[in-house]
Image: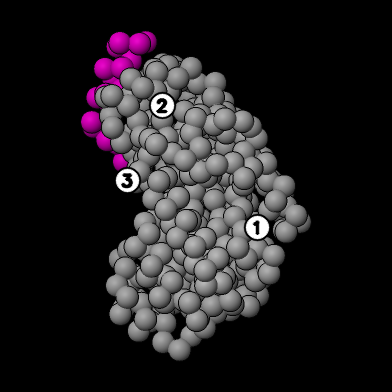
Amino acid sequence: MKILFIGGTGIISSACARLAIERGFEVYLLLRGESERKRPVPPGAQVLRGDIRKYQSAEQALGQHTFDAVVDFVAFVPEHIETDLALFRNRTNQYVFISSASAYKKPVVSLPITESTPLHNPFWEYSRNKIACEQRLLHAYRADGFPMTIVRPSHTYDQTLLPFDPHGSGGTVLSRIDQGKPVIVHGDGTSLWTLTHNEDFAVGLVGLLGHPAALGEAFHITSAESLPWNEVFLAVARAAGRQVDLVHVPSDVIAREHEDWGAGLLGDKAHSVIFDNSKIKRLVPDFHPVIPFWQGAREIVAYHHRNPHLLRVDPVVDALMDRLVERYG
């Protein structure tokens, strides 16, 4: 099959591109430029140079290409979907939108979460935008037959991503662990969380490409492992060869102190999640996640200790943690 990944060098997309190439697919990546890549282009992928945020640039890059499947890893708001509908309505037999499992209703009403769990998130704009994207695609499918598939990952990681809020400053937590300083855990640390290695996720995603039964459907693709947040922090500390003092702080307190951090907690991570992956397994029988988080934690810590210049410490978050430790420790 001939596949286009919009992106292809991100945490999720890089693993999917590698696996698709290994399976003999003809893989194209639509990328903006060399300076914006955090990961190298997988050997065997062909690069189309264009900016998906600029219609004319993307159209010129695509030229006369058509595809068996297109996967957009970087669509976040309905305007992005409108661009994709205009570009790919007659270019592909399948369009895959990467949504988010954070779109499922919070607080969670019942477990396990299935694809029929309602979508509703009053806390986090990111999730509401993903829901709006899904709704636009469902309308396009029902009204015009646009061949869409929706995929909802849940906290998919590779060695570059520390699993801690606030987003983008997980290095603050690892730095504190390395220094022997206490770290903040939301709530009492017993809510359950699902972390999925990108290589496991890729098996599910690539297995859906070109599958006729996937059209018009939504799937979440997650690990079967659900860990208390206390264990997530302890796994990282063990991987770093450290002991760590966990200080528990109510999520709504954190939200008052740090709006961005709080949105991700109240809208997602503060709630226990257990996923039923029966639907993806019915279509992709070889989807069986095999990488536990303790192994992933070792990869993450080793990567950041090899590359200390990438360990970004947010001084605002670090100072906030010090204040919260003093108040609640």
Q: Which residues are magenta?
A: 311-329
Q: Quadrant of residue 285?
A: bottom right
| The label number, if any, that marks residue 309 in the structure image | 3
Q: Is residue 276 above or below residue 217?
A: above
Residue pictured at 61% horizontal, 30% vertical: 110
Tell me whether circle 2 and circle 1 mark residues in contact (CB < 8 Å).
no
Label 2 vs label 1, nearer the camera: 1
Q: Position of residue 186 (x, y in %)?
A: 43, 23
* Nearer to the camera, 207 or 34: 207
* Residue 283 is at least partly visible in this image: yes
Q: What residue would you read off at disc 2?
A: 177
Q: Is residue 54 above or below residue 62?
A: above
Q: Position of residue 26 (x, y in %)?
A: 58, 78
- If you read the primary sequence from the N terminus, does the residue marked by circle 2 or circle 1 appear first? 2
* Nearer to the camera, 269 or 320: 269
Label 1 vs label 3, nearer the camera: 1
- If you read the primary sequence from the N terminus, does the residue marked by circle 3 or circle 2 appear first? 2
Q: Position of residue 137 (x, y in %)?
A: 49, 62
Q: Is residue 320 left or right of residue 213?
A: left
| The label number, if any, that marks residue 298 in the structure image | none
